[in-house]
Every structure is written in C-alpha cells, then in structure tokens.
Image: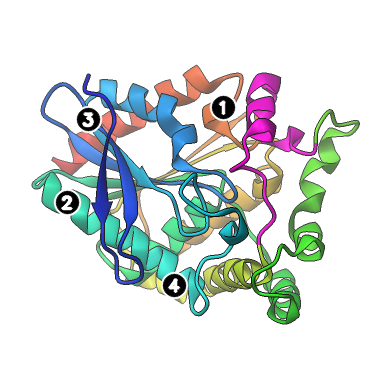
Amino acid sequence: MADRKWITVETPNRPDARVSIWEPDSAPRAIIQIFHGMAEHIDRYDRTAVELARKGYVVAGHNHKGHGPETPDDQLGFFYAEHGWRKIVEDGHAVSEALRKQYPGIPLILLGHSMGSFMARDYIMRYPGEPDALILSGTGWYPPALCHVARAMARIAPPNKPAPRINEIGFAGNNKPFQPARTPFDWLSRNTAEVDKYVADPRCGFIFTGRGYYDLFDGLLGLTRLSGLDHVTVTMPVCFISGDSDPVGQMSKGVLKVAQQFREAGIKNVTVKLYHNARHELFNEMNRDEVIADLSAWLDETMRKLY
C-alpha cells in the first residue's frame, strides 16, 4: 500500500487546508473523508485509515481550523473571528470537492467523529444530495437550553483565550461515570495506553477559546432545528456507531434520539450499532477490531447499494 501523502486545498476561508490521504494499492472503491473530533487531529486516525485503505478505500482528512500540529499554540481552539461554525463546515465541503476531482466517478462517504459528527450532520443539511453515505461516530444530542446558555456565556468570554468555565459547563461531566478516574480523559476509552497517548499529545485535550465555544454551541444549537433534515436525500445510507458507555452520546440515549430523528425525517436506510461498555473513541477502544470489522461489513453492503 502506498504511503500517506498530502495535498493542499484552498477553501473559501483558508488557502492552506493540508489534507492527508491514504491510498489503496488497487483502484479505489470509494473515498472515505474523515472529520476528526474536538481538541484532537487527523494523525490520530492513521491506524484506522491504513486498515480501511487495505480494504480498497481512499481515506482522507484535514485538520480543522484551530487544530493540528500546524496550528500555533495561541490559536488552538479558535476557528474564525466570525461565522466560525459555518466556515469550518464550508472548509470540509471544499475538501470534499477537491477529493471528488482527484478521484472522479466513485462515491464519497463522510465519517464524522464526535465534533466531526456534528459537523457532518450540519454538512448534509447545507449541501443536499451530498455525501453519498454517512458514518456518525460518537455523536450525541445537546438540548437547546444548554446550547443557549453556553453560547451566551461564550459570547462575553475573551474570544482568543481558553474558556475553562464554559468547558466545565459543557463537558466536565464526561468523566463522572468513571470515578475514581485515573486521568481527566478516562471517558475516551477503556484502553489506558490510548488515553495516555492522548494526555501526552500537546495537540490534544486543549480547552477551546471563548469564540471557539461560541461557534461550537452555535453549531450544536443549529442541529436542534431539525427542519434541515427535510432536504437530506432519503435514500442516503447512514450508520451510527457508539459505545453504550459514551457520555457524549448520553450513554446511548442521545445516539438513539438522533437516529430516530433521521428516521422521522424520512431517511430510510439508518443503521445503529452500539457496543457494550465501550466509551467515546471506538477506533481506540479495546474492541476496535470488532468495530472495524462491523464497519467494513456495513461499507461492503453500502457499496453494493451505491453501485
């Protein structure tokens, strides 16, 4: 299999979105575009991307604005000065278009994890008919009241400085089910080695700035207005995967709620797979081989439907 390569994509908002690409040895079956999660980066998906490339897929992903090794320390957790949520989704769509040009004639499957899953849900409402299929990992439901309060607090917080108080309101409860906890990030995975890698990574676990949190909760609030799902292609295959001990998915309740909303919007091909005792990062969990095998089987079935 070819080594990972990189291309630079100019989006409507930035000239230098650096996209990692993992190519299969044979002609690709489809493109899988990854939207990574909050306070992490695309390099953490290397192992998963290599495994999916071995199964015949081009796998690609970029670091969202305010993330990744190329981001200066004082810009971590900051998207854009205005309309940040909309712009990071626009960036992702521009990368999609570049990938379709580079690999024409094959389906594009969007895989969003955590914050990336929220971006992916927004994406399908902004760009009807795109992508060809959707995988949502570690998604969840944030009620409008929480989004309004957190967004209002973020509005008056320093825009370019970390906002720990807002972080506490929105996410501090994630670790509570796992007390006594070994680290502040035990909620990510039962695999202690993977948690320790996250803790040791200087580009992981940072606190968003005031403006970053404003944009995040503005985006989450937009997802509570479900009329946008009326424009989603009803035949698009959608796969939800989550640990049933993932606090972001409200221990599976939030995942099931979102999946039901998709079904109520008329989307006909919705699959939900919950993994017993697994936490937030399924691709770094103890049962990750099971997750990859199940995802590969779903992809095989989806490809039969798309072709």
Residue, disc 1: 284
Say which label, 1 or 3, has the lower sequence index: 3
The numbered mark, 4 or 3, whose residue comes first in the sequence reads 3
Question: Which three-letter amino acid code belongs to the residue tagged 2?
Answer: Arg
Question: Is residue 6 toward the left or the right of residue 80 in the image?
Answer: left
Which of the numbered marks, if any, corresponds to residue 266?
Answer: none
Mark 2 vs mark 3, CA separation in Å: 14 Å
- Report how far apart the C-alphas of labels 4 and 3 lie in the structure: 29 Å
Q: Which residues are magenta?
A: 184-208
Report x, y in % for residue 83: 48, 78
Position of residue 1 measured from the top left corner of the image (x, y, whole percent): 22, 19
Colour style of the rendered protein structure:
rainbow
Residue on which the image places disc 3: 23
Name the kind of residue labelled 3 in the image.
Answer: Glu
Q: Tell me which amino acid carries mark 4.
A: Arg
Choose the circle earlier in sequence order: 4 or 2: 4
At 60% from the left and 67% from the top, the residue drawn is 212
Q: Can the viewer see residue 233 in this picture?
A: no
Q: Is residue 205 magenta?
A: yes
Residue annotated with mark 4: 86
> Marks 4/2: CA distance?
21 Å
Residue at 34% of width from left, 24% of height from top? 50
**Closer to the camera in the image, 26 or 139:** 26
Identify the mark at residue 100; answer none if there is no mark. 2
